[in-house]
Image: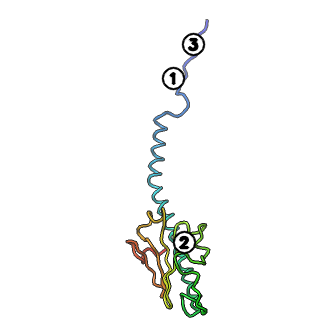
Amino acid sequence: MNLPAPNLSGGRRPRPAGVSLIELMIVVAVIAVIAAIGYPSYVNSVVKTKRAAAEGCVAQYAAAMERYYTVNLRYDKDAAGNDNGLVGNSPQTRLDCASAQNSGADYKFSVDATNDTFTASAEPKDAQASRDTLCGTLSINQLGTKSATGTDGAAKCWAN
């Protein structure tokens, strides 16, 4: 005669191993909340990092303009009357920091110059332009005066 095996779990059936659908939905919901909080912070950090790179590049343009002035005693032309290659929206000479591999993919760099003045600018483009409305275009002139076209102004935008 075969007798049933004794129930050693105290009358309850053993629970099957695995994860229930409710537990899985709770984990997915927690991950979604964490992502919803973290993603905007991540995007903000990326925007600030790209802005800091553009600030550095604009400062390099300003330094290059000062070196040019030291040699030629003017910002726009050399002693022979040739135009400064850094000046204009489509300059003949670009600094490495303005290349597409560096900050050139997110900012358009330009230098406007006269005989005794210059303004070097970095204008955000594409996604950077839509995400960085607080600072906008960053500029520096021959006096070292920094400016920003956005609502935060130069003091906050150039503080990085």
CB-based contact (under 8 Å), mark 1 and mark 3: no
> In the image, what residue type sits under mark 2?
Ala
- How far across and down, in percent of the image, does residue 20 sit? 49, 33
> In the image, what residue type sits under mark 3?
Pro
Choose the circle earlier in sequence order: 2 or 3. 3
Choose the circle earlier in sequence order: 1 or 3. 3
Crowding at mark 2 (Cα within 10 Å: few <14, some 14-19, many 20+) = many
**Helix, strand or loop under label 3:** loop
Image depth: mark 2 or mark 1 in front: 2
**Helix, strand or loop under label 1:** loop
Q: Which of 15 and 21 is in front in this view?
A: 21
Q: Nearer the viewer, residue 96 or 157?
A: 96
Q: Mark 1 points at which residue?
A: 13
- How far across and down, in percent of the image, does residue 22 sit? 45, 35
Where 2 sits versus 21, above or below? above
Where 118 sits versus 30, above or below? below
Where 98 sits versus 38, above or below? below
> In the image, what residue type sits under mark 1?
Arg
Crowding at mark 3 (Cα within 10 Å: few <14, some 14-19, many 20+) = few
- The quadrant of the picture occupied by the N terminus is top right
Q: Name the residue under label 3.
A: 4
Q: How far apart are marks 1 and 3 (CA)?
A: 14 Å
Q: Mark 2 points at which residue?
A: 53
